[in-house]
Image (spheres, rainbow, N blue to C red):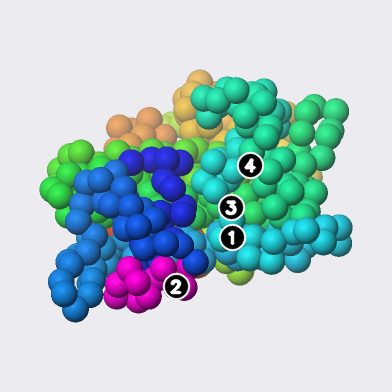
Amino acid sequence: MDPGDLNLRHMRAFCEVARCGGISAAAANVHLSQPAITQAVAKLERSLQVTLFARSSTGMTTTEAGALLLRRGERALDLIKMGAQLCQNASEARRAKAFSNLDQHITNSQLRALLAVSECGNFSLAARSVGTSQPSLHRLARDLEQLSGVPLFTKVAQGVELTPPAVNLARHARLAFAEFQQAFEELDATRGVDSARIMVGALPLLRSSILPGAINALARVRPDVQVGVIDGPYDDLLHGLRHGALDLIVGALRIPAPIGDVVQETLFHDRLAVVGRNGHPLSGRGAVSVRDLADYPWVIPRRGPPTREHFDALFREAGLAPPKGLVESSSLILIRGLLLGSDRLTLVSAHQIQHEERMGTLQRLPLDLDHTARPIGTTLRRGWHPTATQRLFLDLLRNAVQENLPPT
């Protein structure tokens, strides 16, 4: 089941029945008739293909599957409630007819419309992305705007953008959908179906050996798990993590953490190395100086990543101008090609060139860079509760670190 197909009214009814232990008490709390709640729970069970309640003359108790769904469902509904409150509190232009309990009135379709506009920046493209007509999607978006009493959309030269209050709601909606996705994967597991998906944001450092090792280890024990790996700049990956598009980021950590809603785990500490081709003119020396390095061309990342900051500091602290004719790139494939075909140098983690060192194509130059030690590990959303498969992957990632640490 896709989170986008979930009926939020059915989910709210299920959670209330689970909390109250029966349909009668739940009906009084949510102001729905008993037949309506009975029907909502039955439809939810059919769509999820699980039994959510054990029914008896004394009431209704959640099954194992029901307990799993309740835990995730309550978290997801709380996220929607928080997003709705932040949305309304962030605006000074709230209309008098706005609903104070906005989260109780929002539908899944309205949230899907909001997210589609957020991603596409255009009502027509958004409608196409969710498989509906432009008038239908526009109506859903405007209905949500009317319910909230807050302006959610603003016209720009390129199309439509979300207002800051709408951004709050959209972010929490994405996180709620991610929570529902985890719930569905856990429910499938109770039926013996492995539908788990793991989305990893990968920074350059761990892509070459540690991350492949963890993914291969996971595939050996959970061959049906889908793993998605997204490469990109740190800021883009952080945005994806905080908005539920990624489950974790692996790579160099930022100290301190860039924002309070993420947590970091250090897996090991890494040092940078100056690297050139095997047989580089500087490779035969017992030691090299920064002044020696200044005589050669370089390929380095563009400004922003910590590696570039260390490169700039290397020459600045030696009182030297940086080498001229720099090539700026973070592509290991391009860097490798440039190094192999010239006397060019780069500053890179030893982890990233393990294969080339074993093959005898690249080598580290004898320069002490102990001061460049930096923590490498995982970045997660604060309060994130991984599924069993996600926990297994994190454990395998830790194991892969120990198996792939290069010699210092």
Q: Nearer the viewer, mark 3 or mark 2?
A: 2
Is 157 on the left or on the right of 210, as rendered?
A: right
How far apart are the two marked residues, 3 and 4, measured between alpha carbons? 11 Å
The residue lying toward the viewer, choosing from 315 and 332, is 332
How far apart are the two marked residues, 3 and 2, measured between alpha carbons? 20 Å
Query: Which residue is tagged 3?
Result: 106
Type of amino acid at the residue the image marks with label 4: Leu
Is 370 on the left or on the right of 38, as rendered?
A: right
Secondary structure category for the residue under label 3:
loop
Check if mark 3's residue and mark 1's residue have beta carbons within 8 Å.
Answer: yes
How far apart are the two marked residues, 1 and 4, measured between alpha carbons? 14 Å
How dense is the environment of label 3, judged by Cα within 10 Å: few (below 14), some, or many (20 and up)? some
Q: How many marks?
A: 4
Q: Which residues are magenta?
A: 20-30
Query: Which residue is tagged 1?
Result: 103
Is 193 on the left or on the right of 247, as rendered?
A: left
Say which residue appears at 83% left-offset and 34% top-offset: 155
Q: Name which of mark 4 and mark 2 comes first in the sequence.
A: 2
Q: Which mark is residue 28?
A: 2
Q: Position of residue 79 (x, y in %)?
A: 53, 62
Q: Name which of mark 1 and mark 2 comes first in the sequence.
A: 2
Quadrant containing the C terminus in the rendered view = bottom left
Magenta-span inclusion, residue 399: no
